[in-house]
Image (cartoon, grey):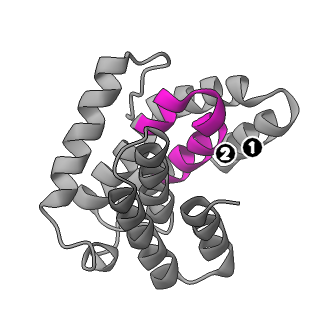
Amino acid sequence: FQARIMQVYTLTTTKGPVEAIDFGLQTLSMLGEKIPNYPSNVCVILKISETRRLLRKHDSTIIPQLPLMTDPQRNAAMLMLQFVFLAAAETRPKIAALISCRMIDMTMGYGASPVSSVGFAGFGYVISIAGQNAEEAFSYGKVALGFSKRFGGDAWICRVTAAVFGC
C-alpha cells in the first residue's frame, strides 16, 4: 500500500495531478472507498450539506478529542484520501470536496486519525472557495488545528496552518 501512496505522490509531481487522481481513486476503490471520477454539481452540493449538518450536531472543541481510528484499512484509506485531496484541490475541486467530506465522515464515524486534520482543513477550504460563510470555514480550520496539535508533528501543523490561513 505504501508503494501506491508513493505512486500518487510521484504522479502528482511528474505526470500531473490528473493521472495521480485517477490512480488514487482506483486505489481507494480497492479499499472500499468509492469516489466518483466526475461527480455532478448536485452530488457535491448534497454531500457538503450533509457534512455541514453532521458537524452542527457536535461541539467543535470536542471533535479533535475523538477516540482513535483503529481499523488499519480505514487508516490506509484516510492516508490515500489525503494524497488524492492534495492532487485534486486545484484541478478537480469537486473530487476534493467529496474527499474532504469523506474524511470527515470517517473521522466522525470511526475515530480520529493523524490525517483527520487534512479533511477538516480541506472542508474549510471548500466552504471558503465556494464563497460561503467564512466564519464557518474558519471554524473547521480550528478543528483541523486541534487535530494537528493532538497528533503533534510540526509537519501537520505547517500543512494545516497553510490551508487555514493561506499562503
**Side (left or right) of 156 relative to 20:** left
CB atoms at circles 2 and 1 under 8 Å apart?
A: yes
Q: Is residue 73 magenta?
A: no
- Percent across and percent down for residue 15 are 84, 26
- Percent across and percent down for residue 29 are 45, 29
Label 2, residues with CA under 10 Å away: few <14, some 14-19, many ≥20: many
Looking at the picture, which amino acid does disc 2 mark? Ile
Q: Is residue 83 magenta?
A: yes
Give the image quarter of residue 33. Answer: top left
Q: Residue at x 43, y 41 (%)?
A: 131
Q: Residue at x 71, y 44 (%)?
A: 3
Q: Nearer the viewer, residue 7 or 151?
A: 151
Q: Residue at x 27, y 79 (%)?
A: 61
Secondary structure of the residue carrying tag 2 is helix
Q: Residue at x 35, y 66 (%)?
A: 69
Label 1, residues with CA under 10 Å away: few <14, some 14-19, many ≥20: many
Q: Nearer the viewer, residue 21 or 134?
A: 134
- Percent across and percent down for residue 83 are 62, 46
**Side (left or right) of 5 relative to 54:** right
Residue 128 in the image: above or below residue 143: above
Looking at the picture, which amino acid does disc 1 mark? Tyr
Judged from this view, the residue extending furthest toward the left is 57
Secondary structure of the residue carrying tag 1 is helix
**Side (left or right) of 52 relative to 162:** left
User: Total marks drawn?
Assistant: 2
Task: Give the prevailing secondary structure in the magenta stretch.
Answer: helix
Q: Which residues are magenta?
A: 78-97
- Which numbered circle lies on residue 9? 1
- Percent across and percent down for residue 80 are 55, 46
Mark 2, residue position: 5
Residue 114 in the image: above or below residue 137: below
